[in-house]
Amino acid sequence: MHHTGTQLLQSQRLLLRPFQLSDADSCVNNWATDPATYRYLSQEPRTPQQVCDWLSTAKQAYASPETYYWAMVEKSSNQVVGEIFVDDFSSRNRWCELDWKVGQHFQGKGYATQAAQLVLDYLRNEVGFHRIQAKCCVENHPSRRVMEKLGMVQEGVLHDFFLGKDGRWMDVVMYALLG
């Protein structure tokens, strides 16, 4: 494993880069406070103050070469439209879990797939992860399609994995891509 942290990655339409405090308005307006972005997650939307507090600590987090956390920036507008990050990992066993969020007004444009492909390639080829996994609520069909487009294989369902905002226990589906 060669941990190199959050490096700049880009496609024709997206720039993946570390978050900055100056991203606050873009995050608040485009995704981080929008309940629709968090519909299939156990996490609650952030308040504008929580966004500012979180971004004010970003520089410290990026000091670690084991931090993999990108702002998903639409090049044409220079707006932060979402985030993509490694949620958990094991250096010893060379696996990591990838997670992403894209604001509802930017969904359906292929941004999650593009960003995840850039990050997958980086994590496999530069960092050295063998297994990259991702999971989502069984009902989150758009995220499932992203995982399938990336060539990830469905491995199973984790039943009653989290308590949904509506009080129902939610099942989660696990996908993975190997070496």
Image: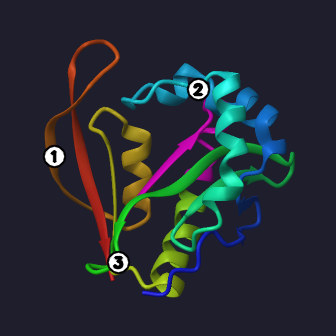
- The amino acid on which the numbered mark 2 sits, given as a three-letter code, is Arg
Q: CA distance from mark 1 to mark 3?
A: 25 Å
Would residue 70 be found to the left or right of residue 3 on screen? right
Q: Secondary structure at mark 3?
A: loop
The residue pinned by badge 3 equals 91
Would residue 24 be found to the left or right of residue 131 on screen? right
Residue 8, relative to residue 44: is it above or below? Answer: below
Residue 86, relative to residue 145: is it above or below? Answer: below
Q: Position of residue 67 (x, y in %)?
A: 54, 65
- The amino acid on which the numbered mark 3 sits, given as a three-letter code, is Ser
The residue pinned by badge 1 equals 157
Q: Secondary structure at mark 2?
A: loop
Is disc 2 surrounded by few (<14), some (14 to 19) or many (20+) residues within 10 Å? some
Among the 4 quarters of the image, the one containing residue 10? bottom right
> Is 26 contained in the magenta span?
no
Would residue 13 be found to the left or right of residue 22 on screen? left
Which of the pair 81/114 is nearer the observer? 81
Q: Position of residue 17 (x, y in %)?
A: 72, 61
- Residue at 70 percent across and 59 percent down: it is 18
- Residue at 37 percent across and 68 percent down: it is 151
Say the numbered circle drawn on residue 90: none
Say the numbered circle drawn on residue 46: 2
Circle 1/circle 3 CB separation < 8 Å: no
Q: Secondary structure at mark 1?
A: strand
